[in-house]
Image (tube, rainbow, N blue to C red):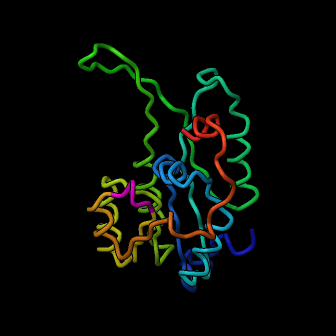
Amino acid sequence: MPGFQDKTNSGGVSKGHSVYVFIDSSNIWAAQKSKVKLLDYKKVAEHIKREYKADRLRVFYYAAYPAEGTRKYSLDSKHKFFTFLKKGLGFFVIKKELKTIGVISEDGEATEEKGNMDVEIAIDAMHHLGKYDTAILFSGDSDFLALVTYLRNHGKKVFVFSSRNNISEELRTGADGYTDILGIEEIWGKELKHRAEFEKGE
């Protein structure tokens, strides 16, 4: 969408106030289940652009998705959603397939799915360091405290968006500001009505 893209001059340096948004979709899913609604990402981008007076806004969306054949439902809607974010909203979608690993617990051997995107988010935030003034992180994971501290030490303003049921105290107090997305009514979209919708988000 117009205005949601980052533009730089010939030297690669942004002019005006540039805001980069990093969305950890798996972490934010807890808020959506709590709200029993889905975030409307068009409204999310518009809200951030307005509230942070962004001349340029670039949004990175990180997601891990199930491998084909591992779910009872079709994954077509999930991939169509990724396409909408990219082509419809101009987001940068970074995705990877969930990996199944073997684990040993008190109950014996089992398998778990892993799709952590923390490394990808940290790399992108650091790689683009010279292109933005403000970073907004959609996550409540305390593992991001080191990244937040690094960005602030390099002159960036960092704001965390998460929910009261899924925010670490370290991250909440370690950034320049914290917003509980459950309280921003204008960014929410359709309701989660069926159990299948809950399962598809995970």
Whether the magenta-drawn stretch holds residue 165 is answered as yes
Q: Residue reaching furthest top? A: 108
Relative vertical location of residue 52 with respect to residue 22 in this rendering, above or below: below
Task: Give percent across and percent down for residue 62.
Answer: 53, 50
Q: Position of residue 78 (x, y in %)?
A: 67, 40
The residues colored magenta run: 162-167
In the figure, residue 123 lies in which quadrant?
bottom left
Q: Residue at x 54, y 55 (%)?
A: 35
Extreme residue toward the front, this view: 193
Q: Main secondary structure of the magenta part?
A: loop
Q: Which of the 4 quarters of the picture holds residue 10?
A: bottom right
Q: Could you tell me residue 144's position as x and y percent?
A: 34, 57
Quarter of the image for residue 129 reads: bottom left
User: In front here: 58 or 169?
Assistant: 169
**Residue at the spot 64% in from the left edge and 34% down from the top edge:** 196
Q: Quadrant of the C terminus?
A: top right
Q: Is residue 164 magenta?
A: yes
**Residue 86 % position (x, y):** 70, 54
Which quadrant does the N terminus fall into? Answer: bottom right
Asked if residue 103 lies left or right of residue 186, the reply is left
Image height of 182 relative to 85, above or below: below
Q: Tell me if 111 is positioned left or right of 7 in this view.
A: left
User: How many marks on residues?
Assistant: 0
Q: Residue at x 66, y 44 (%)?
A: 193
Compared to residue 113, the image places residue 53 above or below, namely: below
Q: Residue at x 27, y 62 (%)?
A: 169
